[in-house]
Amino acid sequence: MKDEKNILVVRLSSLGDVLMTLPAVKAIKNLYPGSHISWLIEGSISDLLSYQGFIDKVIRFPRTGLVQKIKHGSISGSMTIARSFLNDLRALEYDLIIDFHGIIKSIILSRCARGKRLIGFDKIYAKESSHLFYDERIPGRDRRLHKVERNMLMATYLGAGAQEAPDIDLTVPIRYQEYIDNFFREKGISENVIAVNPFSSPGSEFKRWGISRYKGLIKRLRAQLGADIVILWGPGEKEEARSLIDESDNGVFLSCPTDIPQLFALLKRVRLYISGDTGVMHLAAAAKTPVVAIFGPTDHRINAPYGMHSSIVRKDIYCSPCKTKDCPDRGCLEEISIDEVFYAAKEMYYRTR
């Protein structure tokens, strides 16, 4: 058995990046089967991680609570929150701290923990010069390597060998499935259902396919596949999502409010998921739901849904991929037609039936 017993994984956010780190963490757990793995994280995905058997402890960085206390001028309140967090973080001495995130913030938090070895990526994958602060650095080999495969370099470095990313069956308690079952039953939603997510995370609207095209797509899905459609939405998106319902025929439903485990349970129930490049796309892939992903400026080689059952719709134009958030013509998205997305969805729908 390997020497390392207590291991701290640092990947703070976001939803998609955390999900694409899970296979590497599972590979490390397989390498050290008797180890205790803690995961330092922030945000709503922490609940989902806490239900996975190969993760022994989830340590939540209380960013929201700290920000609220500081905004209200409560120095003592913020100090209380910070002290409680640091006590939790430093409760164990870690034989190994693995920073998958690679930013200054993750370095600072990693150095606050009690660890013997701090490992991270070299400069090809690390950001903000964070690679300068690691004890050991994992060299990168390809800037466009998929993030799952990139993260697996950590497991390879530790001795797992050049293996395939392990398959993971995520689980949530039955109460989350019952919540979705009740919603489907109350709305009269059939078992033949497609989830459509026309939105993207805040600040990444440049990745969104046009809402009018989603309207046309939904009509095609209803008319030619006969599937019920559930429109997913998040904070600040409900009214725009409701407009898709108002302009559609029967059989199109607004999703119930969901947290991450509830959304995972919903995605497990549907036949097909359609969206742009979002964290929820990766959650659908993690639920082993067939995915049709519409990619514009972001790099599909790095960020594609990982797994067997996915289809990418994109345009191979000269300027894509790019990181230009204020692109004046958005040709990489505007040139993607409703027909192209529909036929990709139809093929995936019948292929996995």
Image (cartoon, helix red, strand yellow):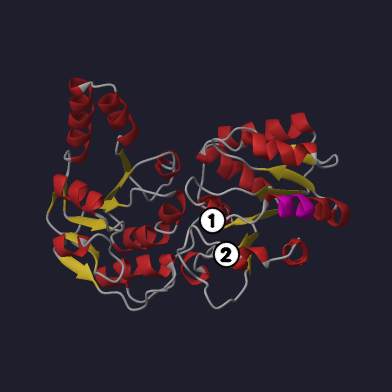
Q: Residues within 10 Å of mark 2 (few under 14, many from 20)?
A: many
Q: Dot 1 lies on which element?
A: helix
Residue stretch in magenta = 212-217
Residue 28, relative to residue 240: is it above or below? below
Q: Which mark is residue 296?
A: 2
- Examine the image and state in which quarter residue 257 appears: top right
Q: Position of residue 153 (x, y in %)?
A: 33, 70
What residue does disc 1 label? 206
Do the residues under discs 2 and 1 have CB atoms within 8 angstroms? yes
Query: Does the magenta portion include 211?
Result: no
**Alpha carbon separation for disc pair 2 and 1:** 8 Å
Q: Position of residue 123 (x, y in %)?
A: 25, 69
112 relative position to 315: left or right: left
Q: Position of residue 160 (x, y in %)?
A: 31, 70
Q: Position of residue 33 (x, y in %)?
A: 31, 58
152 relative position to 95: left or right: right
Decide if residue 235 is in sight here.
yes
Frontmost residue, 264 versus 160: 264
Residue at 12% from the left image edge and 55% from the top image edge:
116
Q: Residue furthest front?
A: 328
